[in-house]
Image (tube, helix red, strand yellow):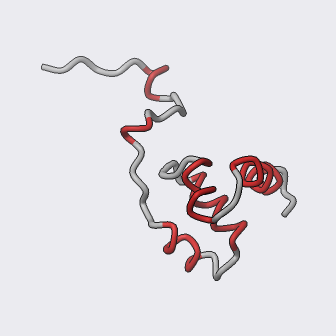
Amino acid sequence: MQAQAEPARLAATAVPKAQRVPAQSWDGHLRSSHGDRNAALFCAYRSGGFTMTRLAALAGLSVSHVSRLIAARERGGD
């Protein structure tokens, strides 16, 4: 019988890289964002399936630029 997970562990927001599974492909995020690259980057990152490094490679941008775009979107800007 397997032990129950501790409540603190269940509430943890960090997901190990090996367990990240993109629910949608990068192209899927672009389509669902109606071609808005910044919105697609934000959604893909927040879904937990993509790292900023991977998104930068897919979008042809620097990691720093992707980071700034996501941070601006989180602040409510664009």
User: Which residue lies at the image location 58% right of the left edge and 57% below the top edge?
Assistant: 57
Q: Position of residue 52 (x, y in %)?
A: 62, 48
**Drawn side of residue 49 relative to residue 21, left or right:** right
**Residue at 51% from the left image edge and 48% from the top image edge:** 48
Residue 63 drawn above or below residue 37: above
Provide residue 12's location: percent of width, then percent of height.
Answer: 51, 28
Q: Report the residue that reaches farthest toward the right.
A: 77
Image quarter of residue 58 = bottom right
- Quadrant of the image containing the C terminus: bottom right
* Viewer-nearest residue: 65 or 14: 65
Nearer the observer, 8 or 61: 61
Q: Position of residue 9 (x, y in %)?
A: 45, 22
Foreground pick, 33 / 64:
64
- What residue lies at 58% left-to-right and 74% top-to-bottom? 30
**Above/below status of 4 relative to 63:** above
Residue 22 in the figure: left or right of residue 2: right
Q: Please, is residue 40 above or below residue 53 in the view?
A: below
Q: In the current view of this chain or complex, which residue is farthest to the left? A: 1
Residue 1, position as x, y percentages in the image: 12, 19
The mark total stands at 0
Relative to 9, 42 lies left or right: right
